[in-house]
Image (cartoon, rainbow, N blue to C red):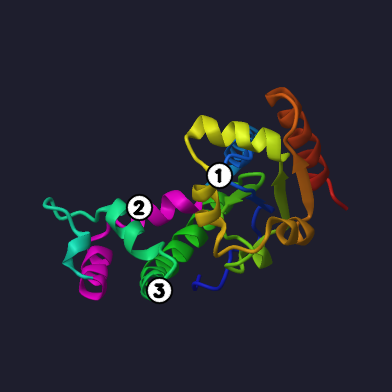
């Protein structure tokens, strides 16, 4: 299987997206409890930063300041280098993505192949920039979380984030209204946890029993 290929037959792939603190991980975890294979792209990407070949390449291209005394990458310092608003930060972000993204994509495809071998009933693809990165093309459905501003502010406060942190993370993403419009389903997270899980179960049943 090459980087651009997926196993056939394969389980249905459900992409789950949503703003930070909108309930996306809760939905993914609940889907996992229903037998799905949860593929968390953020976790996979972070794992790539521990690979010796990645550490070496990033050090050569971004400088030795990103490496700590024990030879590992300082994720905080790396984030400071790539998430600024200036052109240099943007260029460093492109370098980081060119190193990490291809390896992450291969790992994701490997996980999908593994799910097929295990005969999982479906796959949950949890990728923050799913639509921007083109992963929508391999999903059978994309579910987008939607949450009211008031409820969202409450959940953000519980995580210790303010509006500036949210805006920083959203700066290089498509607006969420566009993402919702491009999704198969929109899940409203406005009630209790039980309400959200019940909605997920209904959507999952409909997805797996499509004609």
Q: Is residue 33 left or right of residue 188?
A: left
Span highlighted in magenta in the image: 40-62
**Residue 98 bears which disc, if any?**
3
Which badge, 2 or 1, comes first in the chain's sequence?
1
The image position of residue 55, as x and y in percent, is 24, 63
Disc tally is 3
Q: Foreground: 13 or 189?
A: 189
Q: Foreground: 96 or 44?
A: 96
Q: Secondary structure at mark 3?
A: helix
Task: Give the CA separation, mark 2 to mark 1.
Answer: 16 Å
Residue under the point 20% across and 54% down: 72
Residue under the point 55% across and 51% down: 117
Q: Which residue is mark 1?
A: 38
Q: Dot 1: within a 10 Å radius of its alpha carbon, few (fewer than 14), some, or many (20 or more) residues?
A: many
**Residue 93 bears which disc, if any?**
none
Q: Is residue 38 left or right of residue 140?
A: left
Q: Are marks 3 and 1 in contact (CB under 8 Å)?
A: no
Residue under the point 49% across and 53% down: 41
Q: Which residue is mark 2?
A: 47
Q: Is residue 60 magenta?
A: yes
Which residue is most to the left? 69
Task: Give the CA separation, mark 2 to mark 3.
Answer: 16 Å
């Amino acid at each position: 299987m090459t980087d651009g290929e997926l196993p056939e037959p394969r389980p249905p792939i459900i992409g789950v997206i949503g703003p930070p603190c909108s309930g996306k991980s809760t939905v993914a975890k609940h889907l996992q409890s229903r037998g799905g294979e949860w593929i968390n792209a953020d976790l996979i990407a972070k794992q790539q930063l521990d690979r010796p070949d990645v550490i070496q390449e990033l050090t050569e291209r971004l400088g030795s300041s990103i490496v700590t005394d024990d030879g590992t990458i300082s994720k905080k310092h790396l984030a400071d280098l790539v998430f600024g608003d200036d052109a240099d930060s943007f260029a460093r972000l492109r370098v980081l993505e060119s190193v990490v993204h291809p390896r992450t994509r291969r790992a994701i495809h490997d996980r999908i192949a593994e799910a097929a071998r295990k005969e999982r009933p479906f796959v949950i693809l949890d990728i923050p920039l799913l639509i921007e990165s083109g992963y929508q093309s391999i999903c059978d459905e994309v579910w987008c979380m939607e949450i009211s501003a008031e409820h969202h502010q409450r959940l953000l406060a519980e995580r210790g984030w303010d509006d500036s942190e949210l805006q920083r993370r959203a700066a290089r993403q498509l607006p969420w209204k566009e993402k919702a419009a491009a999704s198969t389903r929109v899940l409203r997270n406005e009630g209790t946890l039980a309400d959200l899980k019940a909605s997920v179960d209904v959507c999952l049943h409909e997805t797996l029993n499509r004609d």
